[in-house]
Image (cartoon, rainbow, N blue to C red):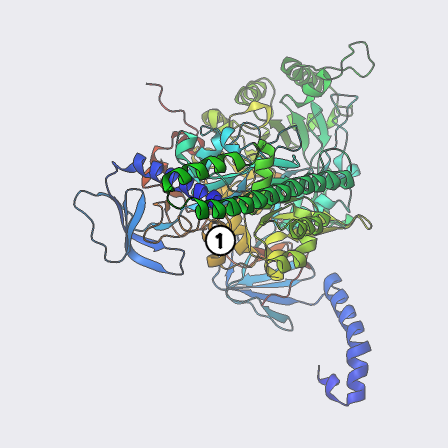
Amino acid sequence: MGNSQRTNNMKFEFTKRILPCLTIVLVAAFASNIFAQAVVYKAGTIHTMAGEPLTPGQILVEDGKIKAIGKSVKSGNAKTVDLGDDAVIMPGLIDAYSQAAFYNGGSADEITNEVTPNFKAVHSIDWSSRTLRRVLENGTTTVNACPGTQNVVAGISAIVKTDGSQESVMNDDAVMLASLCNDPASRNRSRSRPDSIYVRQPTNRMGVVWILRNTFQKTTKAGDDSELTNLKQVLDGKRKLMMVSRMSYDLNTIGSLTDEFDFSPIIVGGHEAYKIKSILAERKFPVILQSNPAGTTTGREGSELCWNNAGVLHQAGITVALSGSNLLAEAQFAHRHGLDRDVALAAVTSTPAKMLGIEQQVGTLEANKDADLIVLNGDPLEFTTSIRWVMVNGKTIGQKKDK
Amino acid sequence: MLQRLRFSCCFVLIATFACATVMAQKPLAIQNATIITGTGETIENGTVLFRDGKIQAVGKKVKVPVAARIIDATDHYVIPGMVEAHSSSGMSQANETNQIVPYVTVIDGIDPMNSYFRQARRNGITTVRISPGNSTMIGGQAAVIKTGGEFIDEMVVDGVAGIKISLRPVSGSRMAHLARLRKTLKDAKEKLEEKEEKEKKAEDKEKKDDDKKSAAKQDDDKKDEKKTEDKNKVSSPAALSELDKAMNALLSGKNSAIIYCEKAMDVGQALRLIKEFDLKASLVLGRDCHKAAKEIAASKLPVILDPTLVYWEEDPRTREEKKIVLPKIYRDAGVDFVFQTNRPGSSTIGSNYMWYQAATGVKYGMTEEEALAAVTSLPAKFLNVDKFVGTIEKGKDADVVILSGKPLDLNTWVETTIVGGEIVYEKEKDEQLKRLLTGEEKDSE
């Protein structure tokens, strides 16, 4: 700014021409981190999600990674940004079950075949998907992009960052998805003509379970390089399996299937999980709870909802993660309805990271982890708190000039 | 004059009726509470005393009668009952298929057992203006009612609380919609003017007759009076249809217009209509209307925001998306606005709660005081019922909410809702909420 005070002429030149250019260059440089400069962010509170919160705290970010974090860090040559005493930093949020990365949130369903274990969600990802941008704006920095629920065995998910860059794929060969709910059947029923080539099984719940059981049976007999290799990995405990299931009786069926075949799924949906909490706790199935429209008492498939599903399951000793397009709001309402404060925050950060097996990289704010974080203007568990900006791999998105 | 007299008579009647039902009430006192009165004052350790459905006293030192029932509200907050300025819930059907029905009234369609009212009491709303829906051109008459009660008669505060006009065509073009609406208003206006002219003529004639008569027959007073009475009967206008009556009320300013604007372009039309027909009006805004925020601010009209306060808007040309935050835009433009709620089940999380709408306002820059006013005193003013509700002041209706903590805090719950001095909601006794929060069924025994 000192330049602008030389002479009036120069001042005019500077403010009218050079300054805008300079600003654009600077902003661009900052946004894309051309100069991967180390920055220390100071904030009134840092929820590291690995131990007690730091009040105040500092975090050193360099080359997209967290280099150091603590009450105070050695800054060296790093630039210091003081975010203020009100500022709260927490890890970027993680959605362990999401469809946001597909074209405008549409799900990836295959409708000609009920068992597609070799389909990979990564090929369906739309890097400029609007829904991806929306969840990023809401603080979500990592999503597990999952195939839809219309197939009994749907395929393999991909874990990606939400910054819309193709380099941000963390795992393109992540979790196997299966459905034990009404979804694969409901669509088939609507095709009216039984002699149509589009008709396929299942058309009811029994059919869904039968296909699942049949597929597992085939898998146990299959050789190592068969079409069912990916499923074999599930039965061998080498690949995680997520099962979308909402009603208590479907969840029960999962229980009996795991008795017949050797696998341990992560439950997705879990609308009525609270009803059979002891069974789920005994079998140690973690649960990813899906968002329900606010204020409703019945959910999909006519499930009876418990607003404190998360709290009840946690009390019973079940690992719970939350899922939805606005994860912070999910955590806020879960806390309001009875889930403990720390558990509610973990349910959108460290817990889903562990479920996805990416806890070495993301989910908490610790040295050597990815610099994925969100900066808020207050307590994350207050409705009146807003997100100031989000950082993915050390790049800031939506930086605002706050007071 | 006569009309107004009749109108206020109605009002008094309703008021006395409401009073009569609570006459037998024991005085009720809330003690040791932090009272946010809504008049800019917060009373720590305060007492509110209710008697006969009204607030009898509020302050730090209030003499509580021995007979009074006492609620100890230590560590609790007391705020005025919230007011929702526009809702089409709580009715069996909010929209009439016939497009011009200014004579129907929501009072005939409100179902006090509708879950809306239970939700409202549970979330601290004590007064609401139920309006016909947004899909009928002239949809009928709105009413301001209390959310506590089992029969509509005991809930109504103001049965003449506006006529809903929607500028969104259900079918056909906006041109046709507007043309039909304007024609209806014009026809009604002409009829009204014609009627007024006739009445005036009749009056003038009567006066002349009277003068003549009084000059001629000064001594026969009694007879004369009788004759005048007869004359009045004769000269009274021909019976008006219900439609005419409703439209007359609208055009003469005895009733107001509640105009729903779906898009920003509708705002301009609404303002034109208001000017053209000299209407008293409030605006119910669809979310697109934020583009007309400046015009809305200049109009100084009461404004009710769309319940979806934050959303993504697509640029139709570039298809790029932008995050729109309604309370911020309107606040920056200087518009006085109030909130309404979405129905439960809306995809926008939290928007079915009035307190969440207020919290969202704070999240995007409103002060807590402003946000609270936007759900209490301001809507009361908009609805012209601020003499009765909206703040905790002596003489106003005994409508308050006891909160477990600071208003708008995440862990704050409505503990007790009081309407007209009667406890209409207690969280402790809310079995449905208990089930929703524990997942356990009530013991069947």
A78 up-or-down from B349: above or below = below
Q: Quadrant of residue B121?
A: top left
A164 up-or-down from B44: above or below = above
**What residue occupies the far front of the structure in this picture?**
B216
Q: Secondary structure at mark 1?
A: helix
Residue B271 location (% of width, % of height): 67, 52
Between residues A367 and A371, which one lies in front from this camera angle?
Answer: A371
Q: Chain of mark 1?
A: B
Instruction: Inspect this view and state whether residue A24 appears.
Output: yes
**What residue occupies the far bottom of the structure in this picture?**
A7
Between residues B120 and A54, which one lies in front from this camera angle?
Answer: B120
**What residue occupies the far left of the structure in this picture?**
B66
Residue A312 location (% of width, % of height): 45, 33
Locate the C terminus of chain B by quadrant: top left
With B318 as the anchor, is B295 left or right in this view?
left
**What residue occupies the far top of the structure in this picture?**
A195
With A165 as the anchor, is B32 left or right in this view?
left
Residue at 68 percent of width and 48 percent of height? B273
Give, as a three-letter code, the residue at label 1: Leu
Residue at 67 percent of width and 34 percent of height? A175
Q: Quadrant of residue A143?
A: top right
Residue A123 location (% of width, % of height): 79, 37
Residue A251 location (% of width, % of height): 55, 23
Between residues B292 and A187, which one lies in front from this camera angle?
Answer: B292
User: Disc 1 marks which residue?
Assistant: B378
How many numbered discs sit on the rendered protein?
A: 1
**Pointer 1 local density, CA inside 10 Å: few below 14, some 14–19, many at least 20:** many
With A341 as the anchor, is A5 left or right in this view?
right
Between residues B240 and B418, which one lies in front from this camera angle?
Answer: B240
Instruction: Inspect this view and state whether residue A170 appears.
Output: no
